[in-house]
């Protein structure tokens, strides 16, 4: 049987990787502008890290982790998300000792054993950013503005930002009680998962997509009406800062997150263009996580976006891996000249391709078309003798004379980029 990739694990082929690099480069540029530095952490961690951070009663920990015992009898897990590992590293290396305010970003593969479909995979990639050490709602607003700036810079008007507050350990228990007493009378209409969630994680019931559960939760109490004074003021300040910046958002008080570490502000960037996989990016505040993992009482906030989902939204645009110039030769005699010219142009940073196989001029030009070269030049005996060639712009066929030198061709190709 032919060997294929594991289900839900994808290859990113060269035709797609230009788009991926564009997304990654845009994120690096926007994040670094905001003072974030890159952190690279392992793809595998001790299983306990994810149980203690994401939460034992979440779908991720209950059903979706790639957990196994290694040869040393240790339980290890392929990371299902980035925040836990980044905070583990923050604590382990005592990054807070120099400065409790750390601005960290990361990108790489994550692993969840979910049912694969468009926009949902078992190996997927996140680009994430986290700020530690700031309680002030300014940090929430900066993170949200940065995420909004990323989507603006990349040229997407979808997705749109939704925000909510999930309260804190002081006010959430009362909300949970209010929600439970509302749902208690509607238990008959709930799915089996939600019946279980009633005891373990009732907020997740608001997020269930099963029609009976959606119907049963209509009119459920709103978390925003149960916030304590501190959480309420925090949420108002976040909104005020977003208004100051002109950042568009809407409030979705039914938004709950699939990870237990969140406190106060939570958010998602949602789209209607990817079917049921509507969240393109998501995150929130996690003021208790660092201490929960054995570190000092330092707050945090951050987000992660799904690279595959951003790539799907960008669609099949061209991301510029095509050559600037294709050099065709009339005969074997000109190949030395063409090769030297290609070598010089490559050293000058111009993307050049030439014929490698001594093919006919016609098939060389077909290849120039196939590679989507911006310009082509033909070199024959006459060009070598005169020291001149004519450079054809492939889009409209317009020809311009140029000296058969690196400088002559370079200036023409560069000029047309401006
Ligand atoms: P999350 O909501 O679980 O949050 O994932 C963030 C994003 O990762 C989602 O919005 C989605 O775009 C993408 N994603 C998740 N699962 C899949 C999948 N199976 N296939 C494709 N894309 C997927 C977190 O992971 C948090 N760590 C975010 C965060 C950072 N919160 C604070 N800081």
Image (tube, helix red, strand yellow):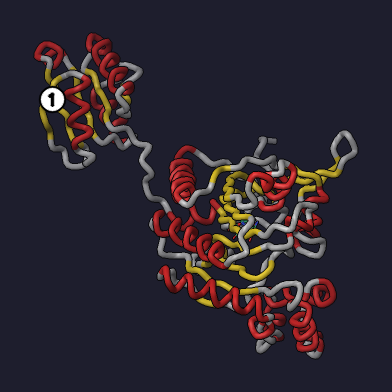
Residue 193 spot, x, y in % from top left: 79, 72
Residue 272 spot, x, y in % from top left: 50, 69
31 and 347: which is toward the camera: 31
- Picture layout, residue 54 above or below residue 325: below
Residue 303 spot, x, y in % from top left: 59, 58
User: According to the image, label 1 marks what residue?
Assistant: 402
Q: Residues within 10 Å of mark 1 (few under 14, many from 20)?
A: some
Give the quarter the ligand 1 occupies.
bottom right
Position of residue 165 in the picture relative to residue 149 (left or right): right
Q: Residue at x 78, y 61 (%)?
A: 55
Q: Quadrant of the N terminus?
A: top right
Q: Residue furthest front?
A: 98
Viewer can see residue 342: yes
Q: Quadrant of the C terminus?
A: top left
375 and 243: which is toward the camera: 243
- Picture layout, residue 169 above or below residue 97: below
Q: Quadrant of residue 300?
A: bottom right
Viewer can see residue 7: no
Q: Residue at x 79, y 50 (%)?
A: 49
**Mark 1, secondary structure of its residue:** strand
252 and 368: which is toward the camera: 252
- Picture layout, residue 362 above or below residue 370: above
Residue 27 spot, x, y in % from top left: 48, 49
């Amino acid at each position: 049987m032919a060997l294929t990739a594991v289900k839900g694990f994808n290859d990113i082929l060269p035709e797609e990787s230009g788009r991926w690099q564009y997304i990654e480069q845009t994120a690096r540029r926007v994040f670094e502008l905001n003072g974030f530095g890159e952190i690279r952490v392992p793809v595998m961690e001790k299983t306990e890290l994810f149980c203690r951070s994401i939460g034992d009663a979440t779908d991720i920990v209950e059903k979706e982790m790639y957990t196994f015992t290694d040869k040393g009898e240790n339980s290890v897990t392929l990371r299902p998300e980035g925040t836990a590992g980044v905070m583990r590293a923050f604590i382990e290396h005592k990054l807070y000792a120099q400065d409790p305010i750390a601005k960290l970003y990361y990108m790489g593969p994550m692993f969840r054993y979910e049912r694969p479909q468009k926009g949902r995979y078992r190996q997927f990639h996140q680009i994430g950013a986290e700020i530690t050490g700031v309680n002030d709602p300014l940090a929430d607003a900066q993170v949200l503005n940065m995420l909004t700036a990323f989507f603006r810079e990349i040229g997407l008007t979808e997705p749109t930002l939704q925000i909510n507050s999930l309260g804190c350990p002081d006010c959430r228990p009362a909300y949970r009680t209010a929600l439970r007493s509302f749902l208690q009378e509607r238990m008959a209409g709930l799915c089996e998962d939600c019946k279980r969630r009633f005891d373990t994680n009732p907020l997740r019931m608001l997020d269930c997509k099963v029609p009976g559960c959606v119907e049963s939760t209509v009119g459920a109490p709103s978390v925003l009406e149960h916030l304590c004074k501190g959480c309420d003021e925090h949420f108002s300040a976040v909104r005020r800062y977003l208004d100051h910046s002109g950042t568009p958002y809407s409030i979705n008080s039914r938004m709950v997150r699939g990870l237990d570490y969140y406190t106060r502000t939570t958010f998602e960037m949602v789209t209607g263009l990817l079917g049921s996989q509507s969240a393109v990016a998501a995150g929130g505040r996690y003021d208790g996580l660092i201490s929960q993992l054995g570190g000092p009482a330092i707050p945090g906030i951050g987000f992660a976006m799904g690279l595959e989902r951003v790539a799907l939204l960008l669609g099949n645009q061209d991301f510029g891996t095509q050559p600037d110039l294709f050099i065709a030769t009339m005969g074997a005699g000109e190949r030395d000249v063409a090769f030297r010219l290609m070598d010089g142009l490559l050293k000058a940073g111009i993307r050049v391709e030439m014929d490698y196989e001594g093919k006919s001029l016609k098939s060389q030009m077909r290849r120039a078309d196939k590679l989507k070269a911006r310009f082509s030049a033909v070199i024959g005996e006459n060009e070598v003798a005169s020291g001149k060639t004519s450079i054809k712009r492939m889009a409209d066929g317009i020809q311009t004379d140029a000296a058969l030198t690196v400088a002559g061709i370079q200036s023409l190709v560069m000029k047309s980029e401006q």
